Image (tube, rainbow, N blue to C red):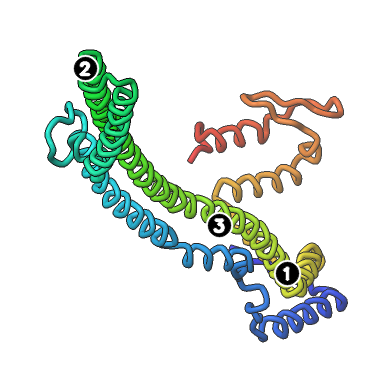
Amino acid sequence: MAITTQRQDPSKLIGQLGQDYATQLTGLTSVPLDTSKFAPSVAGQDALQTQAASLAASGVGGYAPYLSEAATYGTQAGTTMGGVSPYITGAAGLTGPGAGTGAGSIASYMSPYQSQVIDATLSEFDKQAAIREQAIHDAAVGAGGYGGGRHGVLESEYQTQSDKNRALLNAQLLQQGFGQGAALRQQDYLNQLGLAGATTGLAEGLLGLGQYQTGLAKLTPELARGDIGTLTGVGEIQQRQAQREKDAAAEAAKMAAMEPYQRLGTYGAGIQGLAPFMGGTSTAITPDPTALQTALGWTSVLGGIMNPNIGTQYVNWPGQTTSNQGATTSSFLVDPLRDIAMGTGKYGF
């Protein structure tokens, strides 16, 4: 077995390039990268987001004062409504005929001075009646008929009419007092109902104020949520912009930090492209010839010695040869070569 080794040395320029690349690679990788310049970072909250958070925190429970005020108005409304009942009860007591002299009767509304007024009026009436009766007597005396029949008739008629007038005056006074009492009683009834209505209206007004306060309690957080949502939305937009700026700055720093490595990588790739010119060592192993190859070799030698034209023949198996110069076919070595190749005949192995 034969071993053949060939060595091809690289050119001087290739060697210098390789040495320069190795020097730069060693120097570049010996210094750690400052990754803090392009490490991921998060943009802080925008001022509007901070304001939104503060507003949200301060707005929690902001409805409580309104609810408390609403509860106060509700209590006052309930208390006020409780004051309606006496007026309703009083008005109900004035719906009867008003007879008798007790509370709520017509008599209770009549003037306490009515009897005195009636007495004084009747007394004045009697006084005037006596004066008129005396005038009748005086006229009868003057006519010389005092004590006569005509005088008696005239006096009797006068007395009867005076009594009627006195009774009518008394009835009128009583009726007037009754009418005034009934009107006052009716007015009191209306007043009771009016007070009941006014008290009810006041209670409803207080209840309305309570409902208004409740509405404010509901509206306050809704308005706060609107403000918070607006501030949060705008703040997020500004925060995203700040984050993009941070990411862009980090990417730029990373590109700047990695640029020497990329440049050195391009340098190395270029050197690698010169690999075919960098030389090297190649080894070829030639195996020993087989017995058949040895026999064929000796046969060729012997054939060349004994028949110089054998080299111009082409052997076509089996048993046929063709000459390239029109030479005749020789069987001196054809049959032996064929037998050796095919392992037959007396030359076969």
Left or right of residue 29: residue 291: left
Above-or-below relation of 317 to 347: above
* Residue 233 vertical position relative to residue 179 in the rendered view, above or below: below
Which of the 4 image quarters holds residue 44? bottom right
Q: Residue at x 69, y 70 (%)?
A: 250
On the question of residue 118 being in view, the answer is yes
Rendered position, 108 above or below 43: above
Residue tagged by mark 1? 249
Q: Earlier in the sequence, mark 3 or mark 2?
A: 2
The residue at which mark 2 appears reads as 148
Dividing the picture into quadrants, the one containing residue 52 is bottom right
Residue density around tag 1, few if under 14, some if 14–19, many if 20 or more, within 10 Å: some
Q: In this rendering, which labeled residue sits more in front, label 1 or label 3?
A: 3
> Disc 1 on helix, strand or loop?
helix
Q: Is residue 268 left or right of residue 73?
A: right
Is residue 266 placed above or below 224 in the rendered structure?
below
Q: In this view, which residue lies farthest toward the front? A: 144
Q: CA distance from mark 3 to mark 2?
A: 117 Å
> Looking at the image, which residue is at 48% across and 67% down?
58
Whether residue 5 sits left or right of residue 212 in the image: it is right
Which numbered circle lies on residue 228? 3
Nearest the eye: 277 or 188 = 188
The one nearer the camera, 150 or 284, is 150
Would you identify the image quadrant in which residue 186 lies? top left
Q: Name the residue nearer the viewer: 270 or 307.
A: 270
